[in-house]
C-alpha cells in the first residue's frame, strides 16, 4: 500500500463542510418535528379512529415501511415535477423524509398508546376528567414518555438517512462531500472526514434529544423512574 | 417516445434478482461478522468489549451511503483495481448489517436469564458447550422476529448500492427512467416490487413475535 493520505487539500473546504452539516441538521430537525406530528396523529387515528381511518393509516404505514427511502425520494421529487408543480430539491427532501419518518413514528407511538392501562382510563373517567383532558394527560403524554427512547433512535436514524437526499441533489452534507471529492480527487479522505462529521452529528442529536426529554418529561426527571 | 413496456418490466424483474442476491450476501456476511461482534460485545475481557462497542457505534453512527463510498474508494487505495461492484456493495452492506445485527443479537443473548448461564457453569460445561447447548437455543427463539424484521431493512438498503455502480432494482428504475422519462410510473413499479419482497417478511416477523409472546400474555 503506497497511498499517501493527504487531508491538507480539504482544509480549504471547511466552510462548505460546515454548511452541509448545518443543512443536514436543519433538514433533520424540520422532518423530525413534522414527522412527529404526522406520526402521532396517525397513531391516534389508528388506535381510536373509525374503521376507514384505521385502514388508511395501516396501509400508509405498511407501504412506507416496506419500500426504500431512496425510491420514496425519487417518487416525491420526480413525481411532483411531472404533476407540473415545481419544488426545490430541499423541499422534496423534507416532504419525503416527513412522510417516511411519520410512518415509523406512528408505529412507535401506537405501541406507547397501547401500553396505557385500561384502569388508568377508568380512573380518569371516575375523576371526572373531560375527554380531551384524558387524551392529553392520561394517554398521550405518558405514552410518548414511555416510547421516547425508541423515538430518539428513530430520529438519529432519520438524520443519517437524510444523506440519501443527496441523490436528488439536496445540498446537505453528503452532497457537499460528493462535490468536494470530485473537485479535489481526495475521495477517501473526504468521506473519512464526512463520516466523522456524521458520527459527531449523531452524538449531538442524541444528546440534544436526551436534554429535550429531561426538560419535557418533568415527572420522569423528578422521580427518576420509568412509568 | 415509447412508454413503459413489458421489456422494462422484464429488466426490473432481472434487477430484482440482483437485489435479492445482494441482500442474501449482506445477510450471510453480516450475520457471521455480527455474531462474532455480538460475542465480543458480551466478552468478559474489557478491551474486547470496548472494541465491539466502538465498532457498533461507528457503524450505527455513520450513514450507509458514506460507508459505501469509503469502501468503493478504499478498495482502490488498498491496490485492487477494477473490483466488481457486487463485491464493493457486498462488503459495504455486510459491515452495515453486522453493526446492527450485533446489537440485536447481543440483546437476545443477554435476555437469556442469568441463572441459565450460572447453572451451565455449575454443571461444569465448557464455555463452548454453554453457548451452543444452553444459551443459543434459548436466544435464537427470541432473536428470530427482530432478525427477520431487520431483513426488511437489508433489502431496502440494497437500494443504496447504486452509488457504487451496482445495477439493482432502484438503479434499474433510474436507468429506465432516463430513457423513457416516466418517473412516476417507473418508480411506482419499483416501489411495488420492493413492497412485494418486504411485506411478506414484515408480516412473517410480526407473526413470529406474536407467537413468541403467547406465553407472556
Image (spheres, coloured by chain):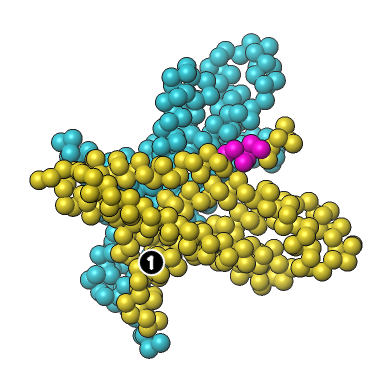
Chain colours: A cyan, B yellow
Residue positioned 71% across, 67% down in the render: B43
Element at label 1: helix
Of residues A218 and A41, the one nearer the viewer is A41
Q: Where B14 falls versus A88 (above or below)?
A: below
Q: Which residue appears at 53% of the width and 17% of the height?
A: A132
Find residue A223 and report its horizontal and vertical position in percent: 70, 38
Tell me the magenta residue range.
B206-211
Image quadrant where residue A195 sits: bottom left
Residue nearer the viewer, B176 or B33:
B176
In the rendering, at what x and y percent does residue A199 appear?
A: 46, 61
Figure quadrant of the N terminus of chain A = bottom left
The residue labelled by disc 1 is: B86
In the image, taking residue A118 as reference, residue A34 lies left or right, namely left
Q: Which of A23 and B151 is in front in this view?
A: B151
**Is A45 on the left or on the right of A72, as rendered?**
right
Q: In which quarter of the image is residue A75?
A: top left
Asked if residue B165 is positioned above or below residue A79 in the image, the reply reads below
**Local crowd size for mark 1, using a 10 Å CA cut-off: few (<14), some (14–19), many (≥20):** some
x%, y% of residue A218? 61, 35
User: Is B48 on the left or on the right of A69, as rendered?
Assistant: right
Amino acid at each position: 500500500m503506497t497511498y499517501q493520505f493527504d487531508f491538507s487539500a480539504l482544509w480549504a473546504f471547511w466552510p462548505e463542510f460546515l454548511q452541509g452539516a448545518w443543512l443536514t441538521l436543519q433538514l433533520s430537525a424540520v422532518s423530525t418535528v413534522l414527522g412527529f406530528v404526522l406520526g402521532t396523529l396517525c397513531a391516534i387515528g389508528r388506535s381510536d379512529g373509525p374503521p376507514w381511518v384505521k385502514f388508511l393509516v395501516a396501509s400508509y404505514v405498511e407501504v412506507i415501511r416496506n419500500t426504500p427511502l431512496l425510491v420514496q425520494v425519487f417518487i416525491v421529487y420526480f413525481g411532483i415535477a411531472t404533476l407540473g408543480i415545481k419544488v426545490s430539491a430541499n423541499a422534496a427532501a423534507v416532504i419525503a423524509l416527513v412522510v417516511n419518518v411519520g410512518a415509523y413514528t406512528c408505529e412507535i407511538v401506537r405501541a406507547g398508546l397501547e401500553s396505557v392501562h385500561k384502569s388508568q382510563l377508568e380512573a380518569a373517567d371516575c375523576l371526572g376528567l373531560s375527554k380531551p383532558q384524558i387524551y392529553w394527560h392520561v394517554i398521550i403524554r405518558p405514552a410518548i414518555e414511555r416510547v421516547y427512547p425508541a423515538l430518539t433512535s428513530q430520529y438519529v436514524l432519520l438524520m443519517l438517512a437524510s444523506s440519501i437526499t443527496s441523490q436528488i441533489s439536496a445540498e446537505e452534507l453528503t452532497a457537499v462531500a460528493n462535490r468536494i471529492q470530485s473537485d479535489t480527487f481526495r475521495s477517501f479522505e473526504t468521506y473519512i472526514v464526512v463520516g466523522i462529521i456524521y458520527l459527531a452529528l449523531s452524538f449531538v442529536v442524541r444528546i440534544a434529544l436526551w436534554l429535550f426529554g429531561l426538560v419535557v418529561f418533568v415527572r420522569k426527571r423528578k422521580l427518576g423512574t420509568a412509568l | 417516445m415509447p412508454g413503459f413496456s413489458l421489456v422494462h418490466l422484464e429488466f426490473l424483474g432481472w434487477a430484482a434478482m440482483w437485489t435479492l442476491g445482494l441482500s442474501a450476501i449482506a445477510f450471510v456476511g453480516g450475520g457471521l461478522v455480527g455474531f462474532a461482534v455480538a460475542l465480543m460485545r458480551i466478552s468478559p475481557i474489557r478491551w474486547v468489549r470496548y472494541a465491539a462497542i466502538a465498532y457498533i457505534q461507528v457503524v450505527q453512527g455513520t450513514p450507509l451511503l458514506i460507508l459505501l463510498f469509503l469502501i468503493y474508494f478504499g478498495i482502490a487505495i488498498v491496490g485492487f483495481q477494477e473490483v466488481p461492484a457486487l463485491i464493493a456493495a457486498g462488503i459495504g452492506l455486510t459491515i452495515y448489517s453486522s453493526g446492527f445485527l450485533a446489537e440485536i443479537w447481543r440483546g437476545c443473548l443477554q435476555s437469556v436469564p442469568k441463572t441459565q448461564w450460572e447453572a451451565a457453569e455449575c454443571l461444569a460445561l465448557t464455555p463452548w458447550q454453554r453457548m451452543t447447548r444452553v444459551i443459543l437455543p434459548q436466544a435464537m427463539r427470541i432473536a428470530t422476529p427482530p432478525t427477520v424484521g431487520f431483513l426488511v431493512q437489508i433489502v431496502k438498503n440494497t437500494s443504496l448500492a447504486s452509488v457504487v455502480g451496482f445495477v439493482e432494482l432502484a438503479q434499474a428504475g433510474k436507468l429506465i427512467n432516463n430513457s423513457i422519462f416516466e418517473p412516476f410510473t417507473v418508480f411506482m413499479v419499483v416501489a411495488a416490487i420492493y413492497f412485494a419482497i418486504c411485506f411478506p417478511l414484515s408480516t412473517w416477523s410480526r407473526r413470529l413475535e406474536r407467537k413468541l409472546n403467547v406465553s407472556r400474555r
